[in-house]
Amino acid sequence: MDGTRKRWFAWAALAAIVATAVALGWIATRPPDPSRLLAEAQADFQAGRLEAAATALDRLAAVRPPTPMDHMARAQVAQARGLADDALAEAAAIFENPALGPLARLLAGRVEVERHRLRAAEAHFLKAAEAMPREAQPYEELAYIDNLQHRWDDFDRVMLALSDRGGLSFQRLLHWGKARHATWNPREDCLILAKCVEADPDDRASRLVLADGLRRMNQIEEAEAVLAPLPDSDAEALALRALLAVEREDDDEAERRLRKGPPDDPHLAQVRGRLALKRGDADGAVRAFRLALEASPHDRAVLHGLGTALRLAGDPDAAAKCFEVADRHDAITPLILRAATAAGAADPTLPAQLGAACAAAGRIPEAIAWSRLALANNPLDREAQQAVYRLERQLDPH
């Protein structure tokens, strides 16, 4: 009896072991849950565990064909790991996806900015802005490129678009003001721009600003070398070459270079005006600076140049009007400098003051944005309400 009982227990134990082994084997061979793997990868990514996130995504790829969300997660992890080509490939796979395509465009643009390919980045950001017309993010990215490349008309439009979308805080408005009204220190920007030109030699906009920055730092030979790939038919490049000759005090060479360009180009006109003033040709300077002012009506240097030429030409009243307009531009700078202080940032009246100063100088997009901020700070402010309404109508009468 005892032996039979022992044999029965032995068989029962063996059966339990076999059943457990079968169950464990089934669990081991069962495909992992894709949703769980994606959630693990996202949690690892958010926690900065990039290698673990990549491993989870690789396991996920072995379980199922990648979904749009999988591609997006893989693009994010690849970008964070510095794998630019992988990130761009994953993002490109979902560019046409209605939900995630715009976000993939943003990610691709940021990857291109990281590797200093600004033309490619801008193309992605423009696509994102088109797909997300009410979102501020694409315009924030575009503003960085326009600011770096000194494309000021584009920069003003993008910053106003940010204001339209509620994306301009006090600090962002202050950045706009500094970019447009503070003296440019090109040193740091030139380091970035040099990388942009190296990464994309056909990036004309970066090349021009880099050359101008080098000129301002008195690195004349380096600036000439940067401009070398651009033809003399490029009026902006030709104007910079003429300025470089002026910096070397070689006015004859500057004049020779200017003769290669069309007589009515506004970029060349400003340099022609400077040279005309130097040789005492007041009438020639007036003509040149007026032509330059048509293209750049808010350019303080052109306004001062025209005012000086008019005074020398015997027209003090017209000169005074030019200097008055230039003074209205100059009046913005101390307000921007005050806004950059702790006391200025805490001053509730400063946005309205900046709005009024920008409006007086004809800088309507900035005036609108500052006036909107004043109204946001005090929605019951009657003057701010009227200023916003008046300025918006001035910008777009329809």
Image: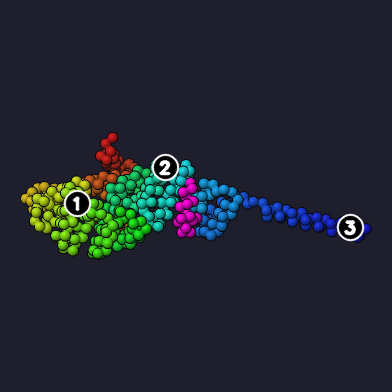
Q: Position of residue 283 (x, y in %)?
A: 9, 50
Residues marked 3 and 2 touching at CB (< 8 Å): no
Would you name the residue on which mark 2 appears?
131
Give the overall secondary structure of the magenta segment.
helix
Q: Say which quadrant the C terminus sits in.
A: top left
Q: Position of residue 198 (x, y in %)?
A: 35, 59
Between disc 3 and disc 1, whose residue precedes? 3
- Is disc 2 surrounded by few (<14), some (14 to 19) or many (20+) residues within 10 Å? some
Give 188 or 122, whichever is nearer the viewer.
Answer: 122
Q: Judge from the rendering whether residue 157 lies leftward or rightward of residue 63; answer left or right.
A: left
Residues rendered magenta in the picture: 77-94
Residue drawn at the location 50% of the way across and 55% of the way down: 77
Q: In this rendering, is residue 250 above or below 293?
A: below
Q: At label 2, which amino acid type do we have?
A: Ala
Q: Judge from the rendering whether residue 299 lies leftward or rightward of residue 172; answer left or right.
A: left
Examine the image and state in which quarter residue 371 appears: top left
Disc ID at residue 287: none
